[in-house]
Amino acid sequence: MAELENPDVMSKLIAFLSSLLERVARSNDADHQQQKVSAFHGLARPSISIQDYLERIFKYANCSPCCFVVAYVYLDRFVQMQPSLPINSFNVHRLLITSVMLAAKFMDDMYYNNAYYAKVGGITTAEMNFLELDFLFGLGFHLNVTPATFGTYCTYLQREMLLLSSPPMPPSASPSSSTSPSSEVGRPMKMAAAPIRSRFIGEDEASHHKNQQQLAAV
């Protein structure tokens, strides 16, 4: 996805991922009292919006653009493997900073240390270290993202961003619900109860599309 090097494309990607996560978090907030509390949960909702937070990470992390796609893959995997920890307004920010940091470590030859990411994320270094370890165990240390998996996620993101930028069709021309495209990062994230799809979407295309349809229902 060479287009990621284009600032305009990255701006749209950040906006789309933020919107997706916002919908997922808002949907899961209704059941917040019944959900399991984890190290990623804050005592209160952060005052900074998801989009502002993601833009801050993009501005200061200086990681390659593909890291944000890989972070989306990691979030998807995490919520599928940890269904009792759905993404909500109390944990989404910590999940974001942790997933992007791990993506940078896995994808980039050079990256900042945990102390730097902690400052970017507005948490302590000790907490950043703990969140990293907790996230890794939540993923089962499955960090590898195959080219096929990466391509599948990129295709989905490109399609959804294109749909968002397209003018709305008149009701008579709108596709039926059975043919509408499934839609972070989506509800393969009810993000699960996060983004988001099958456990490893690139490895199970059918499950990926099924879970994307769930995300679209948010």
Image (spheres, helix red, strand yellow):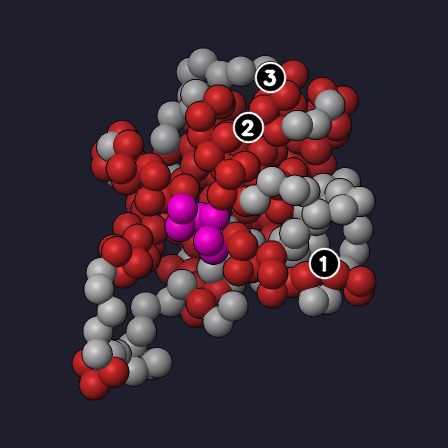
Which residue does the image show at 40% across and 63% down from the upper left? 183
Q: Amino acid at mark 2?
A: Met
Whole-number angstrom distance, CA of label 3 to CA of label 2: 10 Å
151 relative position to 97: left or right: left
Mark positioned earlier in the residue sequence (3 or 1): 1
Q: Secondary structure at mark 3?
A: helix
Q: Amino acid at mark 1?
A: Ser
Choose mark 3 or mark 1, whichever is in front. Answer: 3
Which residue does the image show at 45% across and 14% down from the upper left? 110
Choose mark 3 or mark 2, whichever is in front. Answer: 3
User: Residue 116, how many percent across, how many down?
Assistant: 60, 17
User: Residue 140, how many percent across, how many down?
Assistant: 64, 41
Q: Amino acid at mark 3?
A: Tyr
Placement of 213 over or under 4, stated as above or below: below
Which residue does the image show at 50% across and 30% down from the upper left? 56
Q: Secondary structure at mark 1?
A: loop
Magenta range is 15-20
Residue contact between numbered discs 3 and 2, judged by CB atoms under 8 Å: no
User: Residue 119, how many percent across, how many down?
Assistant: 63, 21
Q: Residues within 10 Å of mark 3 (few under 14, many from 20)?
A: some
62 relative position to 27: left or right: left
Residue ranking furthest to the bottom: 172
Which residue does the image show at 75% across and 43% down from the upper left? 42
Placement of 211 over or under 137, stated as above or below: below
Q: Residues within 10 Å of mark 2 (few under 14, many from 20)?
A: many
The residue identified by callout 3 is 116
Q: Quadrant of residue 32 in the image?
A: bottom right
The residue identified by callout 1 is 84
Mark positioned earlier in the residue sequence (3 or 2): 2
User: Residue 26, how many percent across, how many down?
Assistant: 60, 61
Q: Which mark is residue 101?
A: 2
Dominant secondary structure (helix, strand or loop) of the stretch shown in magenta: helix
